[in-house]
Image: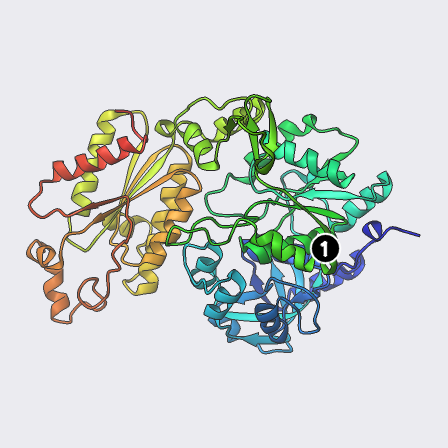
């Protein structure tokens, strides 16, 4: 009798010959270019990682999943897997149409037979899926839902033609059936999986050793390399960190495989989802830690989910998931014993040492010591390669404010001061200059202004990534666009938002170009501050009101802020 964790599971791919034929036919179909998140979803649909799903959810399945964590037929499935598209694309298709799904290079990955098309209630989806009446944009997936995802959902079965191409870590990527075959070959009947989106430190190693011991199982280190939370360590660095410590694990009982999953950071529901995905990969036990897949703090500064909510929900559905939960408390280092203990088993009177993720980032940022009891020297060396001390990293200063508030003037002064200090190249991306060289074809509609700001953000993120300083001074009136730019840049370095909070009245007085006058006369449509709103930043890193202050003083305030953040040396 074959053990269930080693028997093959259904995939959605057709044979190689059929794929060749379908590729030719698909060339004539209307095609949708998938977003990075949709590529992750499609890969796990096609290779069986999302079994029993046969494609993107229909409207009935979507409604049922949002409300009850189950498909319309009652099968447990907690996460809506939907193909969100633009209104313009949705207008071209009706249910019953086939569309080609392509990657960002235009390669056809699959054909989707569209069975449903609908406009979802995104507020309801946010509240139900992410829990507790949360419709809070501090949650990365809720922000994605409202500000990134398309307005229309398509549902329908998918026919897989080829898997997405990965050029990195090919030998470490296994489909569910490849892992099942591996377990079958090695005779692994019990496998405990460890899910991670962070580098592995000594506490994680101790936790995984204990979990494998407790379950009397082999260990699968199964890190997510699709999309995680904005601000996480990039997956290239993380995988190099994992590889650096793999020799600390017994080779005969440990395997590492990469999972191309787009996380939603949905806490309890996400834990159940991760369990079902791991079940499909042939795993029998799954480690669910404290605040599993939690996105951190909400906009009130409180955690979105309780520390053990994910464990509780997983436990309720454990039998149906078909994977045994190994729950682990927080692991801490006990100084007198020179080893790790679960936080609730620390011997009385002992000294507990612990370094939080925030503290680790601070030490990396400031080039401070990271003790060996906390992490492996080879992991720290790898992290230091990609996270040099802050004073050597690139960063972006992003001025926002009304026309005439003084943004460009302060930005120019700041540029000169930073160039005088030397050490890093400085680039000023001024609104007018960008309009001339990057955005000459754009007008001033809301959509065009958004595109212009995102272009500035993209260029600033490339400068930041390569260790330079970018100074931007657009009006940037919309909160959602500024947030998108912040996320683009914070993947590579610090983002300092400076709100130049000069009043409309004062800006009108200074109006050298006569723009406010023309706007008041209705000759300029959609003018920020007059006929179009300016959404002031709620929590900028710095707020400057230039009334009665000279430019030098304002630029100096920015310099002091940069010094206090460790970005420039005093």
The quarter of the image holding the C terminus is top left
Q: Residue furthest right?
A: 1
Q: How many marks?
A: 1
Circle 1 sits on which residue? 47
Tell which residue pokes out farthest to the front in this image.
Answer: 348
Q: Is residue 433 above or below residue 202?
A: below
- Residue 441 is at least partly visible in this image: no
Question: What x and y, as percent, mark residue 502?
Answer: 14, 52
Residue 352 percent coordinates (x, y): 52, 29
Q: Is residue 324 above or below residue 379?
A: below
Q: Nearer the viewer, residue 511 or 118?
A: 118
Residue 477 lies left or right of residue 189; in this view the side is left
Quarter location, residue 9:
bottom right
* Picture layout, residue 375 above or below residue 499: above
Under circle 1, the secondary element is loop
Provide residue 131's location: percent of width, then percent of height: 51, 62
Pick the residue in front: 325 or 564.
325
**What coloring was used for the rendering?**
rainbow
Task: Assess disc 1: are there few (<14), some (14-19) or many (≥20) residues with their C-alpha within 10 Å of its C-alpha.
Answer: many
Question: Percent from the top left, x then y, of residue 538?
Answer: 28, 53
């Amino acid at each position: 009798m074959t053990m269930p964790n080693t028997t093959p599971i259904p995939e959605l791919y057709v044979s190689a010959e059929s794929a060749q034929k379908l590729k030719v036919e698909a060339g004539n179909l209307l095609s949708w270019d998938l977003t990075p998140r949709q590529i992750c979803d499609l890969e796990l649909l096609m290779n069986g990682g999302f079994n029993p799903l046969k494609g993107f959810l229909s409207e009935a399945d979507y409604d049922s999943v949002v409300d009850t964590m189950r498909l319309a037929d009652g099968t447990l499935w907690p996460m809506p897997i939907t193909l969100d598209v633009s209104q313009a694309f949705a207008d071209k298709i009706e249910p019953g149409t086939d569309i080609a799904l392509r990657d960002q290079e235009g390669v056809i990955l699959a054909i989707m037979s569209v069975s449903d098309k609908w406009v979802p209630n995104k507020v309801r989806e946010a509240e139900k899926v992410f829990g507790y009446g949360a419709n809070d944009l501090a949650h990365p997936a809720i922000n994605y839902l409202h500000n990134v995802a398309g307005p229309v959902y398509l549902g329908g079965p998918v026919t897989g033609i080829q898997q997405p191409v990965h050029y990195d870590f090919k030998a470490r990527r296994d489909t569910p059936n490849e892992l099942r075959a591996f377990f079958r070959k090695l005779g692994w009947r019990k496998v405990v999986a460890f899910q991670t989106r962070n580098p592995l430190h000594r506490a994680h190693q101790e936790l995984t050793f204990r979990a494998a011991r407790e379950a009397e199982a082999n260990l699968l280190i199964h890190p997510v390399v699709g999309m995680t939370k904005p601000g996480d360590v990039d997956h290239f660095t993380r995988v190099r960190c994992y590889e650096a410590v793999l020799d600390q694990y017994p080779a005969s009982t440990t395997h590492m495989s990469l999972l191309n999953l787009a996380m939603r950071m949905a806490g309890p529901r996400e834990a159940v989802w991760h369990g079902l995905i791991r079940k499909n990969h042939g795993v029998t036990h799954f480690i669910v830690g404290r605040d599993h897949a939690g996105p951190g703090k909400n906009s009130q500064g409180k955690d979105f989910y309780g520390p053990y909510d994910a464990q509780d929900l997983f436990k309720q559905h454990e039998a149906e998931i078909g994977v045994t939960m190994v729950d682990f408390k927080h692991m801490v280092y006990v100084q007198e014993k020179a080893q790790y203990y679960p936080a609730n088993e620390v011997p009385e009177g002992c000294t507990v040492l612990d370094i939080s993720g925030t503290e680790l980032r601070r030490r990396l940022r400031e080039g401070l010591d990271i003790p060996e009891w906390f992490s492996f020297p080879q992991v720290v060396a790898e992290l230091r390669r990609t996270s040099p001390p802050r004073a050597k990293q690139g960063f972006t200063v992003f001025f926002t404010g009304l026309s005439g508030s003084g943004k460009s003037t302060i930005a120019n002064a700041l540029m000169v001061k930073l160039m005088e200090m030397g050490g890093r190249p400085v680039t000023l991306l001024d609104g007018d200059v960008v309009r001339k060289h990057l955005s000459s074809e754009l007008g001033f509609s809301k959509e065009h202004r958004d595109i212009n700001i995102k272009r500035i953000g993209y260029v600033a993120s490339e400068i930041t990534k390569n260790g330079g300083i970018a100074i931007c001074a657009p009006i940037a009136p919309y909160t959602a666009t500024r947030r998108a730019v912040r996320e683009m840049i914070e993947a590579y370095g610090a983002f300092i938002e400076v709100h130049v909070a000069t009043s409309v009245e004062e800006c009108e007085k200074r109006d050298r170009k006569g723009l406010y006058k023309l706007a008041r006369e209705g000759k300029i449509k959609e003018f920020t501050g007059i006929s179009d709103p300016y959404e002031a930043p709620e929590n900028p890193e710095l707020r400057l009101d230039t009334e009665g202050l000279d430019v030098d003083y304002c630029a100096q305030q920015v310099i002091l802020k940069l010094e206090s953040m460790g970005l420039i040396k005093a």
